[in-house]
Amino acid sequence: MSGWSNVSANGSYTSFLLVGFPGLRESRILLVLPFLSLYLVILSANALVIYTVIAQRSLHQPMYLLVALLLAVNICASTTVVPAMLFSFSTHFNRISLARCLLQMFCIYFLIVFDCNILLVMALDRYVAICYPLRYPEIVTGRLLVGLLGVAAARSTCIVAPVVGLASRVRFCRSDVIHHFACEHMALMKLSCGDISLNKTVGLTVRIFNRVLDMLLLAASYSRIIHAAFRISSGGARSKALNTCGSHLLVIFTVYSSTMSSSIVYRVARTASQDVHNLLSAFYLLLPCLLNPIIYGARTTEIRQHLATLFQRTQQQVPTKKPQVLSSHKEIPG
């Protein structure tokens, strides 16, 4: 525990030590390589699909642009946590101010909620495309898309801001050590020395209300989409519509199952070690970032075809040296 220079006038700590995976102690440096490898895979996989969408004019359509935005959010979410975690593992310099801690908390939760809101916009886009295909170009315009994303960002801010705002008013005098690799809300609240019942109630209410509302909207949208897809007379168009919806549903399942399973285990498995809870937090933060580009890159036909073309061009541009044939006979000058 640090000295009184770390304590404000009201007796609250103003900076904290982030101790991710405290059970490993000095062996935390062994986690650098696996987390660094995972982070580099996340960056390269997401960036590759984003580059493909941006570089190909045929993919400049609302659905693919939303996919690119979703993957960009994945990069931001992983970058908010992993580099600082790797730095603390390798240098053991893991002190963070309360302001930076709250900022990191806001960014993490904002990006998670914004990710879910993008999935809602994608569901609306597919609903119009499949249920009203002839009116799709005039309904889903660039202006509408920007407006919907603005609403999604505003909704994410309104959901996250009260939780972080209430956390900023708490007195932290129990300890200055956060047993987590990031400024997670409940990990920080464990250090409080006052009444935090309002914080817990608001956090839990916001999470449950947000998740239930999202699931109801997604269920209503995709039930109508699948029903309309089965009524398409053309077999090829029906198969394409169902395949596209299948990719979106896989991503939705990955995102929501990881967050919900982490929340359930965090509240049920209280006897589990802190390292297990931290591993689950890393799981729900990084798993969607890893799987989303794989799902869209492998299952979306147009993206998969352009990726294959990109790889073929890259292989063709690699210079190959032809083997030189040495002749034992001297050539006779002509």
Image (cartoon, grey):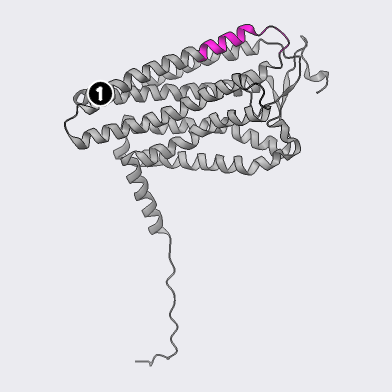
Give how far across and how far down residue 34 sits, in percent.
61, 42
Give how far across and how far down residue 290 sits, in percent.
49, 37
Please say whether residue 198 is one of the residues in the magenta stretch: yes
Give how far across and how far down residue 204 sits, in percent.
55, 12
**Which quarter of the image is occupied by the N terminus?**
top right
User: Does 275 sit left or right of 9 as displayed?
Assistant: left
What residue do we see at 75% from left, 21% from top? 176
Q: Is residue 32 above or below residue 114?
A: below
Q: Which residue is mark 1?
A: 227
Q: Nearer the viewer, residue 334 or 323?
A: 323
User: Does 37 sit left or right of 148 as displayed?
Assistant: right
**Which quarter of the image is occupied by the C terminus?**
bottom left
Crowd class of label 1 (few under 14; some 14 to 19; many from 20; radius 10 Å): few
What residue do we see at 42% from left, 21% from top? 117
Quadrant housing residue 140: top left
For residue 107, say whether it is visible.
Answer: no
Please say whether residue 132 is one of the residues in the magenta stretch: no
Looking at the rendering, the stretch of residues picked out in magenta corresponds to: 192-207
Q: Amino acid at mark 1?
A: His
- Furthest residue in direction right, as rendered: 3
